DNA sequence: AGTGTTGGTCAACCTGGTTGTCCAAGTCAA
DNA sequence: TTGACTTGGACAACCAGGTTGACCAACACT
């Protein structure tokens, strides 16, 4: 007796994501990070989780290295990271997160958790936890996990 | 005892959405609609739900009318809709969905429902229905609903 | 030493949007 | 009926976040 269609489900997922992320971006702007985009946050998290170079980051985010290079350029421009040629391999450019970058993910983590906490109040802790478990099943085959390569996998790695 | 962070929740939502939609796009391609993009489907659905002109569509999708015009141009190019000047108001260009367009949303609806059915098998019908109800709460303030204006609302209408 | 792999870069392009500007056509009130 | 406002559409330029494809220098591995 499900009244909802598959297409509706897609819009529910997208809408929930956008509400969550829009809120975080809006709040980040008021806390001193007006130029932070969601992709910047994900990239910095991936770098913090171990991506040391552009190629590294590309693999972890499952995007092309060209796209990763552009993202890194944007991060450098905004002062969130710096790059430095690897002394042991002059092709590589190692990425370092600046204090400003650390500040960004610290704030953004806090805001994400605040919004999640509000959702928890609405739904109940157990229910939200269950929802997350269920969603995890849907992404289970292709984990979006910045701590590991292939977060948007299913696409072959580049 | 929630082990998950708010940022993880965002990635779960996005990942679930992408898995669902990617599957639909992939399957649509094999069923004779290799050029169909998700935005095309949403636009045609909105048109079918009552959007008769570009400005109309823009309001329903909560995008600029320029963006709506571009989408319509893409739909015309692919043969999913045709446009025709409104005899009663020569500024307006009424949009008509072609048989090809009807075919697209018929197939896409079926595929969406097939994928949803697979998820239902995994989760159980009651659980999936509950998940949808919960997600609906998150988008409740700003309903993504192609049957009504402002599906991505929160942004002011244009 | 030669071959293959890897890291990075340039250039062009795509999608799905955005602003800003403008105008012709419709609406409505005085 | 005329003048003021609103609406529908279109032009141009731009942006974010990707993509392909071609390349080259540097490293790694026989």
Image: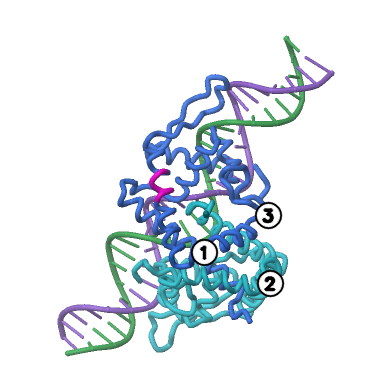
Chain colours: A cyan, B blue, C purple, D green
Extent of the magenta region:
B106-110
- How busy is the neighbourhood of tag 2: few (under 14 within 10 Å), some, or many (20 plus)? some
Q: Position of residue A9 (x, y in %)?
A: 52, 56
Q: Position of residue D21 (x, y in %)?
A: 28, 60
Label 1 residue SS: helix
Give the mark nearest the N terminus, 1 or 3: 1
Q: Are marks 1 and 3 on the same chain?
A: yes
Q: CA distance from mark 1 to mark 2?
A: 19 Å
- How busy is the neighbourhood of tag 1: few (under 14 within 10 Å), some, or many (20 plus)? many
The residue most toward the front is A1
Specify the quadrant of the image occupied by residue B64.
top right
Q: CA distance from mark 1 to mark 3?
A: 19 Å
Q: Are marks 1 and 2 on the same chain?
A: no
- How busy is the neighbourhood of tag 3: few (under 14 within 10 Å), some, or many (20 plus)? few
Magenta-colored stretch includes residue A15: no
Mark 3 = which residue?
Answer: B141
- Say above or below: B145 vs A100: above
The residue lying at 64 percent from left, 50 percent from top is: B153
Pick the quarter of the image with the N terminus of chain B: bottom right
- Please, which chain is the residue tagged with disc 2 on? A
Mark 2 = which residue?
Answer: A117
Mark 1 = which residue?
Answer: B14
Label 3 residue SS: loop
The residue lying at 57 percent from left, 66 percent from top is: A38
- Please, which chain is the residue tagged with disc 3 on? B
Q: Position of residue C10 (x, y in %)?
A: 39, 63
The residue lying at 58 percent from left, 36 percent from top is: B56
């Amino acid at each position: 007796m499900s009244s909802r269609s598959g297409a509706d489900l897609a819009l529910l997922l997208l809408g929930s994501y956008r509400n969550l992320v829009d809120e975080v971006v809006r709040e980040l702007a008021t806390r001193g990070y007006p130029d932070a985009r969601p992709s910047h946050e994900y990239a910095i998290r991936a770098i913090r989780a171990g991506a040391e170079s552009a190629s590294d980051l590309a693999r972890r985010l499952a995007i092309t290295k060209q796209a990763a290079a552009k993202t890194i350029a944007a991060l450098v421009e905004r002062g969130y990271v710096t790059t430095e040629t690897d002394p042991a391999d002059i092709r590589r450019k190692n990425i370092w997160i600046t204090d400003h970058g650390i500040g960004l993910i610290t704030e953004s983590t806090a805001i994400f958790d605040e919004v999640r906490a509000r959702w928890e109040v609405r739904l109940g802790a157990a229910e939200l936890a269950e929802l997350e478990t269920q969603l995890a099943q849907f992404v289970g085959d292709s984990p979006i996990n910045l701590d590991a390569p292939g977060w948007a996998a299913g696409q072959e790695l580049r």
